[in-house]
Image: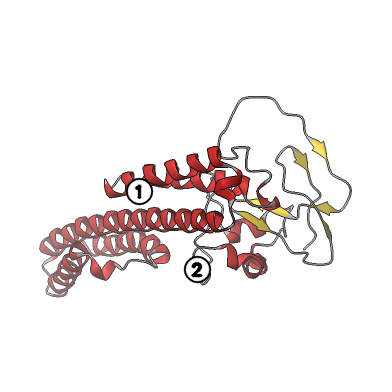
């Protein structure tokens, strides 16, 4: 029974750690299920110390169930937070575009922006957060295509996988992409750590802060490097004086960056 108890502790850590790493906007401590799980965890420990191993195991199972429910709550809250952040970001970007007169220069496309924002808001109010995120991303994608040279590649949906055969071309020697469009890649989503680790970026994930410093003013929360969204265009600063130009193209073959 001792091994069962320690096995429970290992499983418990496996449940909690992923939630606490990414849960900056929410806290496990806010979950009633988490508090209940802590109570059962302590009861399991007390029973174990008293030699009541069967009772300890039952309490540990109860704790396990409550912690699992707490993790589900955190995941749901994080999704809600992401949807809310992206919706606000889309609204702010649309307002900024209006101040620049983009709505008058491109009335038809700007109308689509507003329609997607309205749909996103409706889905958010209905607690359909995944769909809300999709509409916000679509609004941002259209806006990026209307506002500035950094958006020139956003007409291509980099999140869609197709079976079409593409031709791979090779770039000039020692020329690396200057811009990178954030993609939704499952199961490993793009983050600054992963992006810096790509062989055609820095080939070193520990250099992620260099990308963050160059692009933090583009982020919805400038002090939160974890909050990046698909279709965001990142500028990649030169790390060792290497030549960089153009936007990353998956159809091209780039040289491997020397560490």
Vertical arrangement, residue 55 with respect to residue 187, above or below: below
Q: Residue at x 59, y 60 (%)?
A: 192
Local crowd at mark 1 within 10 Å, few (<14), some, or many (≥20)? Answer: many
Numbered label tally: 2
Spot occupied by residue 213 in the image (x, y as percentages of width and height): 64, 70
Q: Is residue 187 visible?
A: no
| Mark 2: secondary structure | loop
Q: In front: 57, or 80?
A: 80
Spot occupied by residue 105 in the image (x, y as percentages of width and height): 61, 45
Spot occupied by residue 80 in the image (x, y as percentages of width and height): 34, 55
Q: In front: 24, or 108?
A: 108
Q: Please state if 120 lies on the left or on the right of 221 as rendered.
A: left
Q: What residue sits right under mark 1 in the picture? A: 121
Does label 1 or label 2 sit earlier along the sequence? 1
Q: What residue sits right under mark 2 in the picture? A: 224
| Mark 1: secondary structure | helix
Q: Residue at x 54, y 63 (%)?
A: 219
Local crowd at mark 2 within 10 Å, few (<14), some, or many (≥20)? Answer: few
Q: Please state if 133 lies on the left or on the right of 140 as rendered.
A: left
Spot occupied by residue 177 in the image (x, y as percentages of width and height): 76, 52
Vertical arrangement, residue 202 with respect to residue 222, above or below: above
3D distance between C-alphas at marks 1 and 2: 23 Å
Q: Residue at x 56, y 35 (%)?
A: 160
Q: Quadrant of the N terminus?
A: bottom left
Q: Residue at x 26, y 55 (%)?
A: 68
Q: In front: 21, or 246?
A: 246
């Amino acid at each position: 029974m001792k091994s069962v108890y320690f096995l429970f502790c290992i499983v418990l850590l496996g449940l909690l750690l992923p939630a606490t790493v990414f849960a900056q906007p929410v806290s496990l401590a806010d979950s009633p299920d988490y508090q209940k799980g802590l109570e059962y965890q302590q009861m399991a420990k007390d029973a174990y110390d008293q030699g009541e191993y069967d009772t300890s195991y039952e309490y540990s199972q109860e704790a396990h169930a409550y912690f699992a429910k707490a993790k589900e709550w955190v995941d749901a809250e994080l999704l809600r937070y992401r949807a809310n952040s992206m919706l606000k970001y889309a609204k702010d970007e649309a307002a900024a575009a209006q101040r620049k007169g983009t709505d008058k220069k491109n009335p038809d496309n700007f109308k689509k922006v507003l329609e997607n924002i309205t749909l996103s808001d409706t889905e958010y109010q209905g607690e359909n957060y995944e769909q809300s995120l999709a509409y916000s991303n679509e609004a941002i994608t259209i806006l990026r295509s209307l506002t500035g040279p950094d958006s020139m590649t956003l007409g291509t949906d980099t999140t869609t996988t197709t079976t079409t055969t593409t031709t791979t071309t090779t770039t000039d020697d020692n020329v690396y992409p200057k811009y990178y469009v954030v993609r939704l890649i499952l199961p490993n989503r793009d983050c600054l750590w992963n992006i810096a680790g790509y062989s055609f970026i820095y080939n070193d994930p520990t250099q992620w802060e260099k990308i963050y410093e160059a692009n933090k003013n583009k982020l919805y929360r400038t002090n939160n490097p974890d909050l990046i969204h698909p279709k965001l265009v990142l500028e990649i600063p030169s790390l060792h004086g290497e030549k960089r130009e153009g936007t990353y193209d998956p159809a091209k073959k780039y040289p491997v960056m020397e560490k």
